[in-house]
Amino acid sequence: MITINVNGTPHQVEAEDGMPLLWVIRDVLNMTGTKYGCGVGSCGACTVLIDGAATRSCSFPAALAAGKNITTIEGLKTGDTLHKVQQAWIEAQAPQCGFCQSGQIMAAVALLKEKPQPTDAEIDAAMTNICRCGAYSQIRAAIHAAAKV
Amino acid sequence: MVSRRLVIFGGVAAAGGLAVGYALMPYSTLDRAKGMIAKEGATPLSAWVRIGTDNSVTVIVPHSEMGQGVHTSMPMMLAEELDADWSLVRMEQAPADMAFANRALAREYLRGDMSIPSWMSGVAEFGARKVAESMNLQITGGSTAVRFTGVRGMRMAGAAARWMLIKAAAAKWGVPESEIVAKQSKLSHASGKSATYGEMAAAAAAYDPPVDVPLKAKKDYTIVGQPIARFDIPGKVDGSAKYGIDVRLPNMSYAVIAASPVFGGTLKSVDEKPATAMKGVKKVVKLPAAVAVVADNTWRAKEALAALQPQWDEGQNANVTQATIFAGKEAALAKGGLTEDHASGNVDEALKGAKSVIEATYKVPFLAHAAMEVMNCTAHFEGDKLTIWGGFQDGLGAKARAAKAAGIPIDNVTLNHTAMGGGFGRRGGTLDYLDKAVAIARQVEGPVQVVFTREEDMTQDFYRHASLAKMRAAMDDKGKVTAWLHTFTEKHDPPEAIRVNYDFANQAARYASDTNPIPWGPWRSVDHTQQGFFIETFMDELAAAAGKDPFEFRRAHLEGAPRHKAVLELAAEMANWSVAPEAGRARGIAIRDAFGTIVAQVAEVSIGADGRARVHKVWSAVDPGEVINPATFTAQIQGGAIYGLTAALYGEISIDKGRVVQQNFPDYEMVRMAEAPVHEVRFIESGARTGGAGEPGTAPIAAAVGNAIFALTKKRIRELPFMKTTLTASTATGAANG
């Protein structure tokens, strides 16, 4: 048994060696906002924040997350108020199918924390998640808009 | 009376032979539909719309949302004609039930405007009556939703409901119908009498919907044409939207599956012990051509499956390779006796008499869909009742397929729609994942979620087929094309993908079918993906051979196609075509007419230090006849272009030993943010028949990029993906266009 803190709540979970954090979040805690996309850390659909850093949870052993603060898409709101990145996502009408967007939003939150006014080049470097619908223009616009808030 | 009600239920006016078709539909369908959408305190005015006593308007949409905005654009069209207050409008996806078969869509097929492609009609084999069968459609594909359901169904239903409300108000207030104003979900009369739609809905329902109701003029639109925010977006930014893979049910198991890696192979044997010995594993399920492990979570199922060493009977295809497939295509074209797709003039004579003939051979590989959400389906048997959860482009077709797979009557199947993490054609008629889930659920107690790993998703897809084209053309000394002969392998849909809109006096397209065991499936824009590349690259080659500017050369061949010409001219104007781009860059142009929408694209590229093309900017000029929601349409054109650009730059599924080589994104690379071009989209609303949005943006991009690469490097790449060819920018500074 390990204890992981997800969105401020500690959970006692059974996770054998090597079990990625993604599957603990999705299948054990049943928090399905974090997505499986590739399982090899390539697409970024599974991105969560671990102590504030954007992390691909499909390739991060749950055991290593013990004692750290994990934030998932479900934990971004404050009460009923959306995070400014989520709000910007709605205003830019960024999602299409939406499946990658939890990961995109988490990556953007981490980027803006580190670089509150990112340039296009900094967005290119930080935002490496795949969006198969190709909503990149809207995602870029949403990040710039959130940076102004 | 009966037939009138049926007609409006379909949302279309009766015409000619179609009345026969409707007569074959069971009359109980309407009542069944109303029964299914009825809610306490709300009145259904037709199968498509329900008005609540709280004055809310709920629009029932028979299509699936996969990010194209259809769950918003359909209600927009209905609400416009209803004169509803948009803030009161809601959306509900129609149940996957025969009562909600989409007759507006079916009618387009029956009119002969389109044939029903077999891959789109999942339900067609289900049922007895031929005409009725073909009407049982809930397809989301072929960019059809707005074109057919919206134009012929939603608008008519909205206008009819408005008419019924006015009729009821006139009777109640004792005033002429013509004096009643219906606006913003409110009815009013100069006498001061007024009522909300909600207050009048119950009385309105007593009237039969009119057969023939006038529609609004475009100039009076207040909803259609506006960039209305989509209904589905809030749930997609906070993690609450539920996709198929997010279904969580009490006592649910998780299964991960591996099918025979060689297409057509079967499972010979598998030693189950390595899996069953592992923690959380409930069962190993053997299917004729696959093995699955059922466990208490996805990870354990995946690990246990990896521990198995299934023995496959690889069948007849174990020696198939990319080379043997293309050799088969070459042979099929060389053999002669090709099928003629279309012809005008006499192309063979014209080529024979030509002073010189220009020839080129083009090649494209297989492509996987790689939707972000891997294929998955959740199924639960309770006796002979089956419940399904998942994302399907055709809910009714999926339901029929599940019934067939389970060997039970369709009414024993309940299908629950989830959001779809991308479709692109994969979640339409190719429902292997549904069949597999049904087969596994048969052997599992309680609900089971069957998930493809990304590797399984990529290697067990239904692929955009590899194709080969040989083009021949001749020109007169003024640079006018006198003969155009297009031969190719593999023809699927849609028919217009093979056509050109240029005024060539003598032209023909002929094709060969080659047999290979790789499963085919519709892939965003279907045959346009390869035909756009063949046709518009060859057109560029002809321009170069004639020494003409590629834009001017195309324009000179569009005298008989004013809409196409206007779109081409707009794209050139947007891109400032006549002014050369900055040094080290060049532009290419291409135009396609796809799914009723004309798109011309200009792409501006440079060559990176890695020898690969980098696309900086794209300009798209688009004539879809009319635009329902400019924000979602723009996003569809941009996203469609990214989908096509990924294929053009990187996309290749190759075959070795009868199986797919590529396993996951690292070897099937995608365009990501850093490579996404700045893409400007502008529309021409010509008023022509409404065209589709989801697929047209994909069609011209490969050719536009390839033509830009040629302009920059003088190297003509005739094989996709472009990454297979290492490039160096021409040393000339100040690159020119085309």
Image (tube, coloured by chain):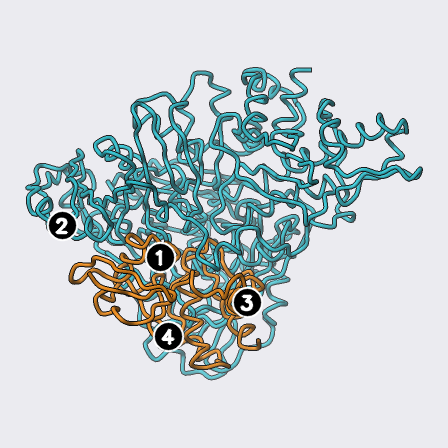
Say left or right for B485 vs B345.
left
**Secondary structure beneath label 4:** loop
Q: For mark 4, what is the residue?
A: A52
**Chain letter, orange in picture:** A
The mark total stands at 4
Crowd around label 4: few <14 · some 14–19 · many ≥20 (10 Å) = some
- Identity of the residue drawn at 16% across and 59% down: A16
Say whether disc 4 or disc 3 marks the residue closer to the N-terminus.
4
Q: Please, what is the three-letter code of the amino acid marked with disc 1? A: Lys
Say whether disc 1 or disc 3 marks the residue closer to the N-terminus.
1
Q: Nearer the viewer, residue B641 or A70?
A: A70
- Identity of the residue drawn at 62% across and 26% down: B9
Label 4 close to label 1 by CB (< 8 Å): no
Give the colour of chain B. cyan
| Image x and y of residue B532, in percent | 46, 53
Say left or right for B719 vs A19.
right
| Image x and y of residue B85, in percent | 72, 46
Crowd around label 2: few <14 · some 14–19 · many ≥20 (10 Å) = few
Crowd around label 3: few <14 · some 14–19 · many ≥20 (10 Å) = many
**Secondary structure beneath label 1:** loop
Q: For mark 3, what is the residue?
A: A88
Say left or right for A104 vs B60.
left
- Picture layout, residue B117 above or below residue B5: below
Say whether disc 4 or disc 1 marks the residue closer to the N-terminus.
1
- Numbered badge on residue B279: 2
Say left or right for A26 vs B697.
left
Looking at the rendered image, the disc whose residue lies closer to the viewer, 4 or 1, is 4
Q: For mark 1, what is the residue?
A: A35
**Secondary structure beneath label 2:** loop
